[in-house]
Image (cartoon, helix red, strand yellow):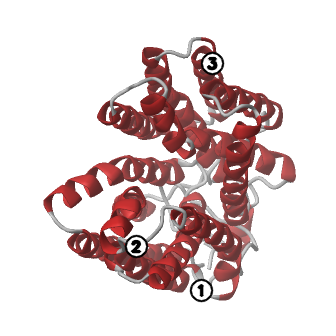
Amino acid sequence: MSQLQAQEVGADRVRGAVPALSIVTTWVFALLPANLVPMIVGELVGRFSVPLDLAGIAATSMTLVNAAVVLSVRPLLAKGRRGSLSAVGLAILVSVYLVAALIPIAPVVLGALVLGGVGSGLMVAAATASLSSMQNPDPITAVAMIVNRVVVAGVFILIPVLGGSFEAMMWALISIGLITFALSRRLPPAVATSPDVAPAGRPAAQSRQALAWLLSVGFALWTVTDEATYALIEIFLGVNIPTLSKDDLPMIYAGAILFGLLGALAAPLFLRFVGRVPSLAVLFGVSIVAKFLLAGGTDQIEVLVASLAWGFALGAIIPLIFGLAAATSSDGRVSVLVNGFYTLGAGLGPLIGTQLLVRSSPVWVGAILAVIGAIAAITVVLVAARLVKRQKLGNGEPLEPHAGAVDAERDESYAIAVR
């Protein structure tokens, strides 16, 4: 494929602030149910007297339903039905929040939590598929992650102002849903791929599909280690540092969240000046060490530094991975696949982490998670390196970052403007 042909294919991708805004608002609202699970579970246990294990099962069910929905609608999204699926998902979310606000009893709230996974899954799938249609998906991904953290922080601040009740939380989410409806009605359509399908391109396309599955599974395993650590960090610190005050825990959480925001801000800089693969390799290494220190560290300063490093690495890794997935195919199949498995890992992480902790000590849990994380990180970095290698023109020279994306879904060799 000549450079001129590559640019012509890449030119089919979408530019513009309006579709980018639609993607960001859709994605941010879709992530809110998962972001607010700790508060919802707290309300279920404290106000509605739901047993903790049942509340945990409901929260895990919501995440698994979300992942199942994301993965099941891939064929529809590849055909371009993004706006309609997003609208259905938004309607489901707003409806279940409204019912839960008007009928705040335990069975209704539990059902709303699980059904929310359906609406959230449809919206996440539509947003991530739409991301693949954009000319430059990496900065949009970073912006979405940053805005998500800002909105979540705003919701946590707003709810006490509104009275701190469960109903206040639901009405806040309904209000954000209505704003999302107004701002997210211009999701970009599926991008047409090149009509010149060479028979010799089929093995290359099959190889790319295999790489996409490896990337998805590897990142899911990685996410298991992150979510297991997040679920158990309070227990780890309580066992290893008995003198740690409960007043110090919010500082550790807040520091990790703040540095996660900084990591998301730094991700485009890493991509531009360091490159995707070297950045991922270093960030994965930092995260593995930090999570092990959180599980086994006995010094308060050491743990605080580890939490900051972990938050920063996580904040940067997610945009780098999602940006790579979005750039790999313009019809969104790879992006949705990676996001679906990411959500699956997020749902299974706390369950796997608690089961490990029941059978061993925090240090051993940290060691096991470190080994799993190392395997996952090596897999993801090798796959990313292979994808970047494939993202070169026939003359072997990579395109300049953001100079134009090139896609050849399901067939010939292709080039994508990603470092």
Answer whether residue 357 is visible to the viewer in this image: yes
Report which residue position mark 1 lands on: 395
Q: Residues within 10 Å of mark 1 (few under 14, many from 20)?
A: few
- Measure how far apart labels 1 and 3 are at the Cα level: 60 Å
Amino acid type of the residue that numbered disc 1 sits on in the rendered structure: Asn
Q: Is residue 38 above or below residue 119?
A: below
Q: For this rendering, which residue is in front, 248 or 312?
A: 248
Q: Is residue 33 left or right of residue 8?
A: left
Q: The residue under label 3 is which amino acid type?
A: Ala
Select label 3 or label 2 by which is in front.
2
Please give the residue where the numbered disc 2 appears in the rendered image: 243
Q: Locate residue 188, reporting x and y percent.
A: 73, 43
Closer mark to the observer between disc 1 and disc 3: 3
* 76 relative to 354, above or below: above
- Label 1 sits on a secondary structure element that is loop
Residue 109 in picture, x, y percent from top left: 49, 21
Instruction: Assign a secondary structure to mark 3.
Output: helix
Q: To which residue does mark 3 refer?
A: 101
Residue at 48%, 79% (x, y): give it. 306
